[in-house]
Amino acid sequence: MRLVLQLVARLLLIVVLCLGAATVWATFDAYRSVDRATAASAQRVAQALQALYWRELLLRSSRAREHLLPVPDWRTLETVKLISPGVCVEFQPAVAFEKPLCGQSEGLGKAPPRWFAAIVPTFLGSHAEVIRPVSPRAASAGTVVATPDGAAAVSLAWEYILNVIDVALLMAAAIALLASLAIAHALAPARTIVTALQRMARGQYRTKLPRFRSMELAMIGSAVGALGNRLEEATEQRAALTRRLIEIRDDERRALARELHDEFGQNLSAILAFANTIETASTKDNSTGIAQDARMISQATHHLMASLRDALKRLRNPLPKELGLEASLVNLVDSWRSQSAARPTIQLDLRGDLTDISGPAATTAYRVAQECLTNALRHGVAREISLRVERRAGEDDALLIRVEDDGGGDAARVAQSAGFGLTGIRERVTAAGGSLSILPARGGLSVAATIPLAA
């Protein structure tokens, strides 16, 4: 999952948790607000009755204090205004058949769902009545008892929750949207960094990144730039070392070719001459067995000399330095065609202008074609082999060499092979700054090398 989506998901989870916590707190506060309203109603009614008590005491001083109780006149509209909605107040000792005086409770909030009306009292408990004396200095003046209505309390809590939830949902949506935009904007440079890393993976190490405002992203960008520079330097050093190793190896190949030609070639020629002499002498003396042995020695010597010539062709300086790339490729294909009529068909396809390609690029292209043809002819059962060399002109001036055969083979196993031939051409192509790929083709393998040409 993308980092932006992860952060937004976590943000939404936090918003949901906060919204749930706010809902629980709103429920608790709304439910307990009835207790506060009950206590306040009892206190207000008690104060009003206390004033009534002392007024009666002053006006009717001839009566005993124990008989000075608030008369039914306390049940007035003014007293009702002192009682909060959902609260009932009664005076004790009460007059016979006297009902509590209640605040307005009809239409108080919306009717809550049954599950809410059942859960809230279970977890938050019931409401207790509140008792206040009419006069703290006269216990005989009576008391005021305020009792909350449980159903009204639940309705008030539900109404309060609905009001809070509407605002909370709007705020949560706004916070989530704005925070998501802020997160996306803050992480937008990460895409630039990823693109730079992808270019580095393709070999474009020196990738310049813009300046980032965030200190963390700026540090990451600086580290990526420094890494690209180090990779570029290491790649250049490795390419230089590879080129030097290839030069040394070519020198060794030329030296080995001279040694093989001077030593083995002369000795094989001497053996062949001796075998011919023995065969001639044995024929004159009618020694059939010796003559036959001499002919076998001659045949083995011819075979060794043919193998030696083939090795010398591979070891000596490549033909591109003498004939040019195009002519050397034609000569390479013709040499393979002329060795045996039973060999598979080799098709040569040259495209583009190859006349001005010389130096290490031409040598690398020739070696790649030579090695791929050798592998296809010696290690496969191909009936048809295609060698295609194309010059891609334009901004990305490069040379494409592709060898395909229908001789079967496992591309993955061949690509992981550590054989000297494949390792050699891979080193040559890498040293030239190119790329090598081994993929399955129709009925066989396809080896493709791309060699950039210097401007």
Image (spheres, rainbow, N blue to C red):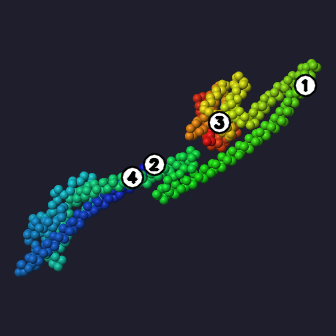
- Give how far apart the Cα atoms at labels 3 and 4 are: 56 Å
Dot 3 or dot 2: first in sequence order is 2
Residue at 26%, 63% in the rendered image = 32
Task: Kindly state the secondary structure of the residue where label 2 is placed.
Answer: loop
Q: Is residue 419 left or right of residue 44?
A: right
Q: Nearer the viewer, mark 3 or mark 1?
A: 3
Q: Which residue is mark 4?
A: 181
Q: CA distance from mark 2 to mark 1?
A: 84 Å
Between disc 3 and disc 1, whose residue precedes?
1
Q: Quadrant of the C terminus?
A: top right
Q: Which label sits in the foreground, 4 or 2? A: 4
Q: In what element is the residue under mark 3?
A: loop
- Identify the residue under disc 3: 356
First reached walking from the N terminus: tag 3 or tag 4: 4
The residue under label 2 is 2
**Amino acid type, callout 1:** Thr
Task: Count the numbered circles shown.
Answer: 4
Which amino acid is tagged 2? Answer: Arg
- Rendered image: mark on residue 277: 1
**Element type at mark 1:** helix
Residue at the outermost bottom position: 62
**C-alpha gap between disc 4 and disc 1:** 96 Å
In the image, is residue 281 above or below residue 170?
above
- Residue 244 point in image, percent of width and height: 71, 46
State which quadrant residue 161 falls in: bottom left
- Relative depth, front residue between 167 and 225: 225
Q: Residues within 10 Å of mark 2 (few under 14, many from 20)?
A: few
